[in-house]
Amino acid sequence: MSELSTGLHNLWQKSGELFSGVSRLSCAIDFIFCYIRLGATPSEYFMYKFYSKSHRERKKFLTRRDYDSTYKRINSADTSVVVDKVKFNSRMTDFIGRDWLYTGGDCSSADFVKFAKSHPSMIIKPYNALQGRGVWRLDVTGEEDLESLFEEKIRGSLVEERIIQHPEMEKLAPGSVNCIRVITLNHSGDVDIIACTLKTGGGTLPVDNLHRGGGVGAAVDVESGIVFTPALPWEGGPTLFHPVTGQQIIGFRVPNWEIFKTRIRDAARAIPELPIIGWDCAITPDGIAIVEGNHDPSPILSQKFDLVGKRQVFRDYIKKYL
């Protein structure tokens, strides 16, 4: 099913709850207009609430089509430094704040056993994982046959020491590393922070990915580090409190915020060949630990929660960069 037909199908299902008193045909025509004229995907049409906005308001948003044309013009270098997590960890040693072991190549079961004894709480992930797929946590109790476990489930994966996050971040959703997603735009070492988003887990997975596990996100003010919007799941309505822990989201102050901004700008300068990067960053008791970088950060996260279009911001940056 094509993207357009999928969007029309979803619109048909949701039109009754979204558009009281408006015909489904009118809704369908409006969506097709946004799809063709603005390049809005079905997800963007609903997440940005285009159905309730004027054309002038809609044009302020950066759609996937616009972003793709921007990204291809600027992030044209080899992206494996962030796609390949082994390369990323090797390059960003000063920023990740944890020990790690790649269990492919010449790595032996003895190497893994040694690492496990030093770091009994570990995160196991595919070296090229996306959206938290295949990530799991291993807590060594001493009763496991670590050599067999290595051969059967771990060989070829990336094994990392579990990040200990700041107690205030842990309260939001214990069991997952609750990160800040930040988009940086780097022009010859002059780094702009475009948008920051708090991402929390849902209590079922060790990751905070909003597509999976029931987590919620909210927009963070770049200057102060204070969450200024209600929380939203990937699909569903807003809430003032985390759905699992009951912790208040709006008004939450992210710890170590000035350290965070300084370090994330330094990190962006460490990969100058990719001017646009989306970073997932954990807040630790005394600083930060970068979890990963994304060469293709979705514009949705930077606009979904505060419903403020960032199209002009990217346009201004392109003019500066080019």
Image (cartoon, rainbow, N blue to C red):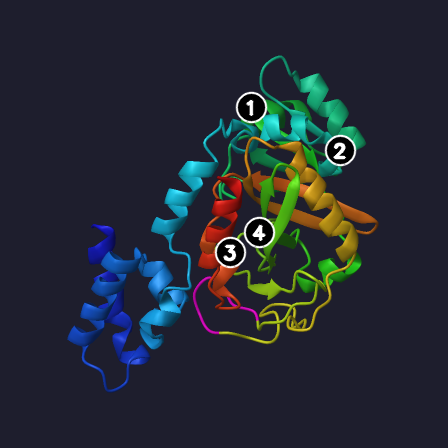
Please, what secondary structure does the residue beneath circle 1 have?
loop
Q: Is residue 134 above or below residue 228?
A: above
Q: CA distance from mark 3 to mark 1?
A: 41 Å
Dot 4 or dot 3: first in sequence order is: 4
Dot 3 or dot 1: first in sequence order is: 1
Q: Which residue is mark 1?
A: 156
Give 248 or 4, whichever is nearer the viewer.
4
Q: Which residues are magenta?
A: 231-237
Q: CA distance from mark 1 to mark 2?
A: 24 Å
Amino acid type indicated by mark 2:
Asp
Please, what secondary structure does the residue beneath circle 4 have?
loop
Tell me the quarter of the picture where residue 111 sits: top right
Q: Residue furthest top?
A: 106
Q: Which residue is mark 2?
A: 94
Please, what secondary structure does the residue beneath circle 3 have?
helix
- Between disc 1 and disc 2, the foreground one is 2
Res 107 visible? yes
For disc 2, the neighbor class at 10 Å (few under 14, some 14 to 19, many from 20) is some
Q: Is residue 199 above or below residue 155?
A: below
Q: Which residue is mark 3?
A: 313
For disc 3, the neighbor class at 10 Å (few under 14, some 14 to 19, many from 20) is few
Q: Position of residue 307 (x, y in %)?
A: 48, 68
Q: Is residue 139 above or below residue 153?
A: below
- Between disc 2 and disc 4, the foreground one is 2
